[in-house]
Amino acid sequence: HINTRNTKLYFGFFSDDLQGATTISLNQWIHTAFVFDATTKQQTICLKGVQDGQASASSALLMSSGNFTIGMNEQVNTPNNYYQGYIDHLSINRRAKSSCEILEIATLAAHFEFDSASSYTDSGPNAVAITSSTTSIISGYKNEAILFSGSSTSYFQAWGFTSLGISNQAFSIIFWIKPQTLSGTLVHLSSSPSGNGSTCFSLLGFASNGAIIAQVLTNNGTIG
């Protein structure tokens, strides 16, 4: 069984149980992964893509069939038997994922390759929704790239990045650019699809001298 016990992640494995090291906070989304390598008999708990506990089991998982139940375990005593909360993007794999794979899944919000018109879509783990206008696909730095015309109707928009609305949340935005003019906005953030919501500002763009500048929204609501 997999649950939280005594405020920590718990990997129940009959007599080879493993408990995580980090105390879990309530009402916050966290990414968790539970991995068992049948070859090495190694158990691993990952929290936010980082190892939170690891141990070696004395034997393989002692089961060959049965039901897979999410949200409850009647074989465990109260209060560890029922789960109250949210679960999203649950996956089951028939192999032990590597630490690099788990870190990417836990931290990659979106990945846009722009290698064809159809790959405007997010190839990352979250299938982020997008829309675009007056853009085209041309030869790029790596395979193909997206081309913007520089007009007010030329843009690419994606939404659903909820972590950007969390205070003191680290993030990275990485891409290649080949400017045709040293002006304009590279990345704009807004709480509204129209781009002018109650919270909106240019995250990355060009200064009047052609330098790339970055700004963020601070805790007191100012942009700097």
Image (cartoon, grey):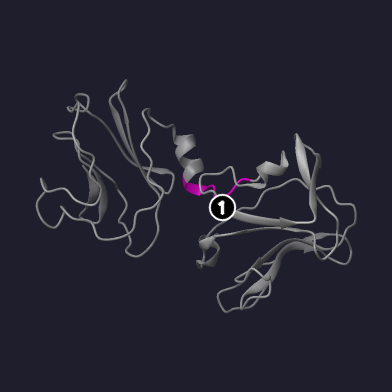
Magenta region includes residue 45: no
Q: How many marks?
A: 1
Q: Is residue 110 magenta?
A: yes
Q: Which residues are magenta?
A: 106-111
Q: Quadrant of residue 209?
A: bottom right
> Left or right of 208: which side holds 155?
left
Is residue 49 left or right of 81 when viewed as pictured? Answer: right
Three-letter residue code for mark 1: Val
Q: Position of residue 77 (x, y in %)?
A: 9, 52
Q: Quadrant of residue 111?
A: top right
For label 1, the crowd category at 10 Å Cα-Cα, with few meaning under 14, some 14 to 19 and many 20 or more, is: some
Query: As drawn, is 97 to the left or to the right of 23?
Result: right
Q: Name the one closer to the observer, 93 or 42.
A: 93
Which x, y percent locates residue 163? Answer: 51, 61
Tell me where residue 162 appears, x and y as whole percent: 51, 62
Please name the predominant secondary structure of the magenta segment in the image: loop
Which part of the image, by quadrant, shows the N terminus?
top left
Location of residue 29 (image quadrant) = bottom left
For image coordinates 51% across by 42% down, the residue present is 104
Q: Which residue is mark 1?
A: 128
Instruction: Specify whether 50 is left or right of 161.
Output: left
**Which residue is drawn at the image coordinates 76% and 38% (left, top)?**
144
**Residue drawn at (77%, 42%), measured in percent from left and top?**
145
* Residue 214 visible in image: no
Describe the element under mark 1 as helix, strand or loop: loop
* Residue 38, visible in the rendered structure: yes
